Image (spheres, helix red, strand yellow):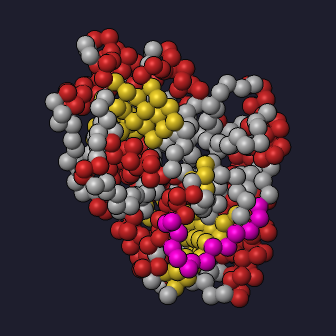
């Protein structure tokens, strides 16, 4: 059996979508002839904690955990966060804070911790892994980012040991949705681009989570790039256990940063409450995950807060159950410069539970293309108020007739097992 060393910051008991991609790949790799060796911090700063994911770790695989130092203690002091408060990497503020202090913290984060706050783990990890590889057979190295410090560890190993290397971009680097929110100096911006270019031209294969981002990485310098999307594990509830919400529930699972706050949706729902008798009596908005305070402000602005229930992170299986019993699943794409390439992890899990999807985002993007090919839902542009209302009403009328179902198709290619087969084929091409 061939061995692949996977360098990842996120691993159970950390929770959230960042964990799932390589946890699930690792789950299926042994059955396809590859033994995963996981290298991950033993004391990472988790976005969330989800011990239920531990069951997906394959038996008898090697998981190497090494200590990491991160500057979050000082960051918490600066922004006045409590010791147990989670730190978001995607500019989500659950409550209003001091703008000046936030800008100072942003400037420090953006210009002194490049590529990210895990930079202090790069050299110790390189030294440890070089010795490990010298004493243990490894056929291939994988790094997955963000955080992109993981790529820099692999870069040093490739440079010194010349082992085949696959760099996986779950999200872009300099084209990530919040990159322009970083208060970067010219020097810091140039350094980010320089490090990104090193990874793109040195790795034997670049993998991105969708075709648009793959093409963007090719244009940025990747000599060999391939798209492997996120996906889903088969998820089935016993038929007699599926009881759809009695109300017309619109459920969003996952975080909602400010860039994902579709104020036009809240306006559409507010308008429908006023113009369609009974709509407000049936409406239930469920937000599961962190939401920026801007979302709450918008809900208040459009008098929707009393129609809304909010839950912070819930375990992955519970989240899937909530998806499966919801009337409609809400997919909000960040209204940012890289929106066309965004296909979030939750999108594929939405597909797996086969409930109608209501999406807001670019109608010429990767998500829209998948929605069209699977017939799994409807999408409206960020500014198309009338089309959003039309799509909501089409679902609502079916709900009133107790016929709100979706007959999606062509989704099997997004199963984690089939995607892992694609990954193994790419591995084989690299080592050959």
Q: Quadrant of residue 412?
A: bottom left
Q: Quadrant of residue 363?
A: top left
Q: Is residue 183 left or right of residue 20?
A: right
Q: Is residue 324 above or below residue 118?
A: above
Q: Is residue 272 left or right of residue 260?
A: left
Where is residue 280? Give x, y as percent: 33, 18
Q: Residue at left 48%, top 52%?
A: 316
Where is residue 371? Give x, y as percent: 30, 46
Could one spot residue 368 in this view of the protein?
no
Q: Is residue 267 above or below residue 420?
A: above
Q: Residue at left 36%, top 32%?
A: 250
For the record, the magenta segment spans: 55-68
Q: Is residue 163 or residue 263 the one in the foreground?
A: 263
Q: Is residue 294 or residue 245 the one in the foreground?
A: 245
Where is residue 128? Give x, y as percent: 76, 76
Q: Is residue 158 above or below residue 120?
A: below
Q: Residue at left 51%, top 65%?
A: 55
Could one spot residue 148 in this view of the protein?
yes
């Amino acid at each position: 059996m061939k061995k692949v060393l996977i360098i990842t910051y996120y691993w159970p008991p950390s929770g959230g979508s960042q964990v799932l991609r390589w946890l699930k790949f690792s789950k299926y790799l042994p059955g396809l002839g590859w033994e995963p060796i996981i290298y991950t911090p033993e004391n990472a700063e988790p976005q969330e904690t989800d011990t239920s994911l531990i069951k997906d770790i394959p038996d008898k695989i090697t998981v190497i955990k090494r200590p990491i130092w991160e500057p979050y203690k000082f960051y918490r002091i600066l922004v006045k966060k409590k010791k147990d408060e989670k730190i978001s990497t995607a500019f989500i503020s659950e409550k209003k804070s001091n703008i000046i202090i936030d800008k100072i913290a942003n400037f420090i984060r953006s210009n002194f911790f490049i590529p990210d706050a895990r930079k202090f783990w790069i050299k110790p990890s390189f030294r440890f892994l070089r010795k490990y590889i010298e004493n243990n057979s490894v056929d291939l190295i994988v790094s997955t980012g963000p955080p992109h410090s993981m790529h820099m560890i692999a870069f040093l190993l490739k440079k010194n040991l010349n082992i085949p290397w696959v760099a996986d971009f779950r999200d872009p680097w300099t084209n990530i949705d919040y990159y322009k929110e970083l208060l970067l100096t010219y020097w810091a911006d140039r350094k980010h681009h320089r490090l990104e270019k090193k990874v793109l031209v040195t790795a034997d294969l670049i993998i991105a989570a969708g075709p648009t981002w793959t093409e963007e990485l090719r244009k940025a310098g990747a000599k060999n790039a391939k798209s492997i999307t996120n996906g889903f594990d088969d998820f089935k509830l016993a038929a007699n256990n599926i009881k759809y919400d009695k109300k017309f529930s619109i459920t969003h699972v996952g975080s909602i940063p400010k860039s994902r706050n579709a104020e036009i949706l809240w306006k559409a729902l507010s308008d429908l409450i006023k113009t369609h008798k009974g709509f407000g009596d049936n409406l239930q908005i469920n937000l599961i995950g962190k939401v920026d305070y801007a979302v709450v402000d918008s809900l208040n602005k459009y008098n929707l807060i009393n129609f809304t229930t909010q839950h912070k992170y819930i375990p992955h299986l519970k989240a899937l159950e909530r998806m499966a019993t919801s009337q409609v699943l809400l997919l909000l794409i960040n209204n940012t410069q890289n929106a066309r390439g965004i296909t979030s992890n939750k999108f594929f899990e939405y597909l797996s539970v086969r409930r109608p999807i209501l999406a807001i985002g670019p109608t010429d993007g990767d998500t829209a293309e998948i929605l069209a090919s699977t017939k799994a839902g409807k999408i409206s542009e960020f500014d198309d108020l009338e089309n959003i209302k039309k799509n909501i009403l089409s679902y609502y009328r079916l709900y009133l007739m107790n016929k709100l179902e979706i007959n999606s198709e062509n989704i099997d290619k997004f199963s984690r097992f089939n995607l892992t087969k694609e990954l193994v084929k790419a591995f084989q091409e690299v080592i050959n």
